[in-house]
Image (spheres, helix red, strand yellow):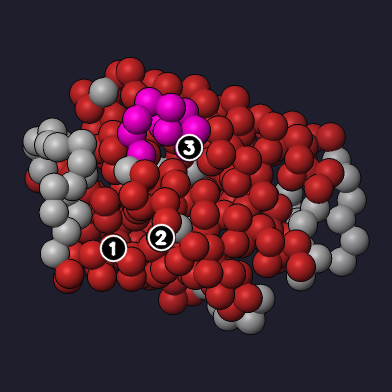
Amino acid sequence: MEIVFSWTNLAFLLAAGFLGSFVDAVVGGGGMITLPAWMATGVPMAYALGSNKLAAMVGTIASFFTFLRSGKVDLHLLRYMPLSILGSAVGAFLAAYLPDTLMRYIVVAALVGIAVYTYMKKNWSGSDEIVHFSRGSFAGMLLMLFGLGAYDGFFGPGTGTFLIFGFLYFGYNFISAAGNAKASNLASNIGGVVTFLLLGKLYFAYAIPMALMEIVGARLGAKIAIHKGIGFIRPLYLTVTVLLIGKQVYDIFIH
């Protein structure tokens, strides 16, 4: 299928890219804005997945370095990020052959759990660093990096939210969890982009301008997340999670 360039579609994607990267830098889940935007343009699904991943990767780079410069990334975790790259490559290959229907059900169930957990957990304070990892929790974190990397390569939306939730579970506070999530999400984006590039499933005429717009949204979102603190982030996190659930329920049961 030949893709016909449209300035209207490009303008639509630029707006979606800014909003999606802003939200993703703060609470994750930006892909639930940007991927449906790609799909709405009529671009074939494989190209939508690959091109969205390229634009997201650029935006994630911007927010990652903002968190990194602010000391909100656990540098010890960076040595394990190749697991996210490997997982994403596996997921991207699977995306070419497997339907996403089952994944949508899993996403809805997981997001409901996240919303309940977030609402019930009133205190998001805590240490900025993990004091001790048991063997079990360390193995669980490595499994999370690979598994969510694979999910990101296969489908993607919600990955940042799942990563934040995972790092919260392992003991990080919200801001540090968001910074670590950016590192892992960047690694999985790299794996997915390389795989889709090898498969020839990138549409650069839309992806590159959208990527530049995502830099603006991601930097602004990351700065607001760092300076506004938990009081700003927690309500926004709950709001975005509820919206993600609603979008998935609509896609599965109504659309």
| Disc number lying in front (3 or 2) | 2
Mark 3 or mark 2: whose residue is earlier in sequence: 3
Magenta residues: mostly which secondary structure? helix
Q: Quadrant of the N terminus?
A: bottom right
Which residue matches tag 2?
80
Q: Residue 213 is drawn in which quadrant?
A: top right
Mark 1 or mark 3: whose residue is earlier in sequence: 3
Say which of 70 and 53 sits in front: 70
Q: CA distance from mark 1 to mark 3?
A: 19 Å
Residue 95 is situated, as x and y percent measured from the top left of the image, at 60, 73
Residue extending farthest to the bottom is: 97
Whether residue 187 is visible here, answered yes or no, is: yes
For the record, the magenta segment spans 63-73
User: In the displayed structure, does residue 3 sit left or right of residue 83?
Assistant: right
The reply to whether discs 2 and 1 touch (Cβ–Cβ < 8 Å) is yes
Which residue matches tag 3?
64
The reply to whether discs 1 and 3 touch (Cβ–Cβ < 8 Å) is no
Q: CA distance from mark 3 to mark 2?
A: 16 Å
Q: Amino acid at mark 2?
A: Tyr
Residue 5 is situated, as x and y percent measured from the top left of the image, at 88, 45
Find numbered disc 2 in the image and state the secondary structure of the residue it sits on: helix
Find numbered disc 3 in the image and state the secondary structure of the residue it sits on: helix
Residue 218 is situated, as x and y percent measured from the top left of the image, at 52, 31
Q: How many badges with numbers are in the image?
A: 3
Residue 187 is situated, as x and y percent measured from the top left of the image, at 52, 54
Say which of 94 and 176 sits in front: 176
Which residue matches tag 1?
141
User: In the displayed structure, does residue 75 sit left or right of residue 99?
Assistant: left
Residue found 28% across the figure and 34% down from its top: 175
Per the image, is 15 magenta?
no
